[in-house]
Each structure stands twice: as C-alpha cells, then as structure tokens.
Image (tube, helix red, strand yellow):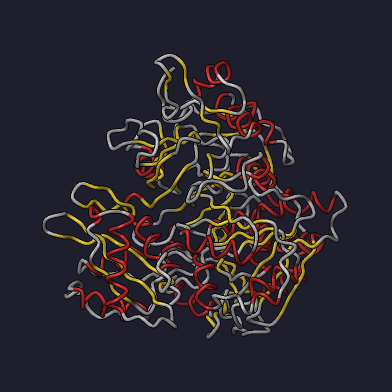
Amino acid sequence: MPDTEFLDTNDFDEFDKAFDSRVVRSKYARKDNDSDYILNKNPYYSKIYDKIFRKSIENPEEFWAEVGEEVEWSKYWDKVLDNSNEPFTKWYVGGEINACHNAVDRHVKAGYGKKVALIHDSPLTSTIRKVTYDELLEKTSRLAGALANMGVQKGDRVLIYMPLVPETVIAILASARLGAVHSVVFGGFAPNELATRIDHAEPKVIIAASCGLEPTRIIKYTTMVEEAMELISVRRPKCIIFQRRNVWEAPLQSYQEDFDELIEQSLPHPCVPVEANDPLYILYTSGTTDKPKGIQRPVGGHIATLCWTMKTIYGMDKNSVWWVASDLGWVVGLSYICYAPLLYGITSVMFEGKPDRTPNASQYFRIIEQHGVNALFTVPTAFRVLRRADPETILGRNYSLKSLKTIFVAGEHCDYEAKSWAENTFKVPILNHWWQTETGHAITATCLGLGHSLNPPKHCTGMPFPGYNVKILREDGSKASTHELGRIAVKLPLPPGTMSTLYKAPERFKDIYFSKYPGYYDTMDAGYIDEYGYVYVTARDDDIINVAGHRLSTSALEDVVLSHPDIVDTAVVGVPEPTKGDIPLCLYVMRTDTTKNEEQINQELINKVRQLIGPIASFKVAAAVKGLPRTRSGKTIRKSIADMARSRAIHIPSTIEDASVFVDIKRALNKLGYAKTVPDPQ
C-alpha cells in the first residue's frame, strides 16, 4: 500500500477494501515480516464523519445539494457547482433565496413567532431584554420599508456602525431583506478608519447607534460618524441613528433620521429574492486602512452551510440556548450571533460586557445559569482573564452550570493551561476549532453531530469540516509528512459559504490567496496533521520563528511559558539576532500574588523551555509587563510588539482594548536592549 500522510480522496476505495471500519492505514502502521501491516486502532474514528466527509470531497454536487435543503429557496438552483473559473467558484447557480426570510419569516410562518430569538444581557446598563421572532419580523420588515423609502434597492450597500444590541441584528436583517449588501463596521473604529470603509463601500445609507459602552466610559459613535463624514471623498450617505436613550441620546444632524421613529412610520416590506451567488455582505478585515480588504460573502451557500453547522458541529437541537461571546463587527458574531442560530430557529444570547469587569468575574457563570445556556463559543483569552481575576472560582461557584454541555473556542491559540483550567471550572468539554474571516465557518472542528470524540487529542483544532480538503504543504508545494510543520492549504474548490472574492479587487483576491500554491487556497497559517487526521494549527505562518534554520511556533513556546504557575498571560515574538537570524522574545504578565521576582521567573522560564523544547529554541530574552495589547475580540497584537522591538514605527489599531499597555511594553523592551529608537507611544 502507498505511504501517504493523510487520506487522499483517491485512496478511499482502497482504504475500504483493506481495513474494517475501526482502523486506519498510515505510514506509522509498521510492516511485520515485510508483508503484513500491524494495524493501529484509531480511538477517534467516526464512521458517520468518515462517510460524510468523503462524500463531500468525492461527490460535492450531490452532497451540497442535500445541505441546500436546510433552507428555503424561492427558486431552486439550475446547477449545484460551477468551478469553471477557479478560484471564483459558484454554488447553487441560478437559485434564488433571501437570508432574512430564512432567519425570521419562515419560523414565524411555522408557528414559532412567540419563541425568544435574542436575549440581550447588558450588565453595563443593568438590563436584560428578550426579543421574539414575532418582534424581530415586525421591526425588521418595517426597517426594510424605511430603507426602501430612502432609495435602498437590491445590490446597494448599507453600512452598519453599532454596538452589540438587538437593533444591530435588526439592521443586518433589514438590509438582507431588501437584497442589499450590509457591511458591519466594528463600533469604536476611529473616524479615519470608518471613512476609509465608507469611501470603499460607497453605502447608500449608514445605520449607527448614538453610542457604545465600555466598563469605564461611553463611546459616542455619532461623534465619530460626523468626523468621518468630513473625511470621505464619496457622496455623503443618508444616516439612521438608533438612540440608546437609557445611555446617551445624540443630537441629530440634518442628514440623520431616528431609528425608532422610522420603524413606527414605515410599512413592512416583503423579502426580495436574490441569486445565490449575489453578495450578502462585505466584511473588512482589521488593519486595512491603506488598502481595504473587503471579504465578499455569497448569500446562498453561506446561509445553507451555517444552518447545517448548528447541529453538525455544535450539536444543537431546536430547543437549545446558544451563546457566542463576540461582537457583530467580527465574522464570528455575524455568523454565529446573528445568522446561524436564527437560521436554525433557536435562541441566541448577546452579552454586552467584559468577562471580568461587569461588575466582576462571575458574569459568565451568571449568564449560563440565568438563561439556561447549553453551549458557549468564546476565545481562549476569556479563560485567561477569568483565571487571573478569580483563579479559585470563588465568585463563579455560586452559580449552577447544569444546563451547559460544551464550550467551543476559536480565534487564537488555546494554550493547555487555559484549557485545563476551563475544563476543571466549567466541567464540560472545551473543544477547539479553527476558521477564518475568509471562510465564514470552521475549516476544522470536532463535529458533535458527526460522532466525533468529545475528547480529541490535546492542542488539535479538530478534523477537516466537510468540503475542506486540507493539506500541509512545504515551501516548494510538495505535501508534508505526518507531524511535519508546514503551510496549511485547502485544495480547490472551497465549499459553499466561503468568500467569493474581495470587493472591487478580484485580481488581488487571486494574488493573495491562490497564487503561492496553484490549485489551493492558502490559509497563511502554519500547522501539521497527525496520524489520525487531526489538524494542529500552530500559528500564523509569519508567527513562525526561524532560529538558525529551525522553524519554531510561537504558540508552542507560549504554551510552555503559560505552564509556569506564576504567569497568567504571555506573547512570544521573533527578534533579530546576528548569528541565528531570529530568536524568541517573551513578554509575560505575572500573577498579582506571586512571591517571586522577575529575575527568578526569567531563569525558570529559560530552564523550562530548554527542558521541554530544547536548546535549539535559543530562549533567553524575557521580561514581565503589566499587560498585553489585545483587541476587543481577544486577539493579541503580536505584530505591534515585534515591530516595536525592531524599532519600527507602530500603528495602534482603534480596536485595542487598552492602548496604554504599549508604554510599559516599550519600557520592558528598552531594558532588554530593543526599541531604542521608537518614540514613546501616545
């Protein structure tokens, strides 16, 4: 039998003939007397997953036609798949559909109008609000009517600049109801970044809120909208303002209309069907002020796939309560606060607050008990924050977690210490999975609806989700061996629901994602695949540190650092070194109650890395800091640290939760001999 690192699609028939359903064949199954294979049993094997996954790869048209039945179509497709112009793959060609109809109308029509669609829980305003599918239909259809009266038609853009409130979901769905293309911009982006997106998308209408909230301040969105309007070069769009009257009411300008008044005055508007490959939304990735990179998502494949993932990946049933601790300005929020749970017809929790500060570290536990949450989707940083604030769960243990079945994490590396703490604290499986803004849903996951083990191997991000033919490639494009670190790529075609292009930039779309490895989507992430087919995402490929020819993952080093009992957070970046090229530089946050000093911890870290990873890591540069730069979605901005260490000018994004940490980071880097010529951060 051939020696391959992973099951290629043309191996499936041979695989079936050779072995029974409880074993796998691979290069690690050794030969006995040069004739027979000794078979290793695969403890993670799922016959359901195996059957579904191969069908998605071998017979994608039949497979995705079945998934397409998850939603209602105004007109069925003429052709399931058209990949004649790769990478501009089209799915459900000729089919007509409406996302708002599938998220709201069809559930009301089926008799579920009184069911709670959204629970908005805001410790920042001391309010809890429940929105039924009936109310969602009423307000969404009337806002769509108001937008239509303002001239919005199918294909027009509507830019949404709002916090995590139900009205943001209403604005999203009202745009989709008309067949318009929504672009949600994270509330709090600075005026110049907002202006860049307005110039690029050229929206006919902007829907904004009067303000957003942080634990210590009110963020006046209308002020930033007005400043952005002075910076734009395109025609000024019309503007609707949702007044948060219980927080702060903005004085309306002459070009602005009141959100609530428009809903009261407007007649309901019916859903407008659009072709399956028409855009549902444009989502700009962060840090795109110079060259906006707007991910364009096609409507048909996206909503069909999202609906299917709720049971396939997350194991939800129709009575489930689902909570995603994110924001609607990020892809996770769009996919899994707004669309997926509503398409599936369940209840989605919206939490406006911080896990440790609104008012204390018990909020996650309170929400789970109070709303009967069955599954939580969050970022690993949330666990690190909770662990730092309440390591013994003194506050959290006052609440019952009996409704909770699983926790899913994504968005960043999930270190072993945070995962172990969370498992011991919440008493449920913590399942990591991996996806990107570009894909809109998971590339790899532990699929509860397909029989995957609730206890997958440590550090993995699951197995490829159906439709993703994942490979690990070397720099020259050849396939890597089992456990060999390389670039993660996906063989074309990509499954339905992934990005269809970059808005106004099709050539850039091809160049960024498909030029390095022809025939593959380049994820630009690094990782490997083990002997069972599990995928391990170690870092963005540019987070790999090349130390004297040895490629080391920053996440592997961070795992070792976080295993130190006196450290609660860390970031490792590569810095130049004359003989080795690069070496790792580690910044870390100490526990407030530690009795050790920085010098002691540094030496212990050096010894620990040497013991667990080896001398090749050349780990010798470390310093304690007060905090790390994180976005409001929980990601650590390592690039800013690396740039500062290399004495490069840094851009501090407006999404940084606490920009003041850079002052202390510069002090620490100076002490280590770096960042000597960088001006003090403002």
Q: Quadrant of the N terminus?
A: top left
Residue 319 lies, in percent from the top left, at 80, 54
Q: Residue at x 38, y 52 (%)?
A: 539
Label count reads: 0
The vertical placement of 663 against 401, above or below, is below
Farthest-out residue, front: 33
Q: Nearer the viewer, residue 563 or 669?
A: 563
Q: Nearer the viewer, residue 364 or 104?
A: 364
Residue 588 lies, in percent from the top left, at 35, 72
Q: Residue at x 77, y 71 (%)?
A: 264
Determine whether, in the image, residue 124 is placed left or right of residue 286. Answer: right
Q: Nearer the viewer, residue 415 or 76?
A: 415
Determine whether, in the image, residue 387 is placed left or right of residue 102. Answer: left
Q: Residue at x 50, y 28 (%)?
A: 83
Q: Quadrant of the C terminus?
A: bottom left
Question: Quick check: can you spot residue 63?
Answer: yes
Residue 376 lies, in percent from the top left, at 64, 60
Farthest-out residue, left: 578
Q: Nearer the viewer, residue 172 or 598?
A: 598
Residue 557 lies, in percent from the top left, at 34, 58
The vertical placement of 609 against 280, above or below, is below
Question: Quick check: can you spot residue 205?
Answer: no
The vertical placement of 422 against 541, above or below, is below
Determine whether, in the image, residue 573 is placed left or right of residue 87. Answer: left
Farthest-out residue, top: 35
Determine whether, in the image, residue 366 is placed left or right of residue 200. Answer: right
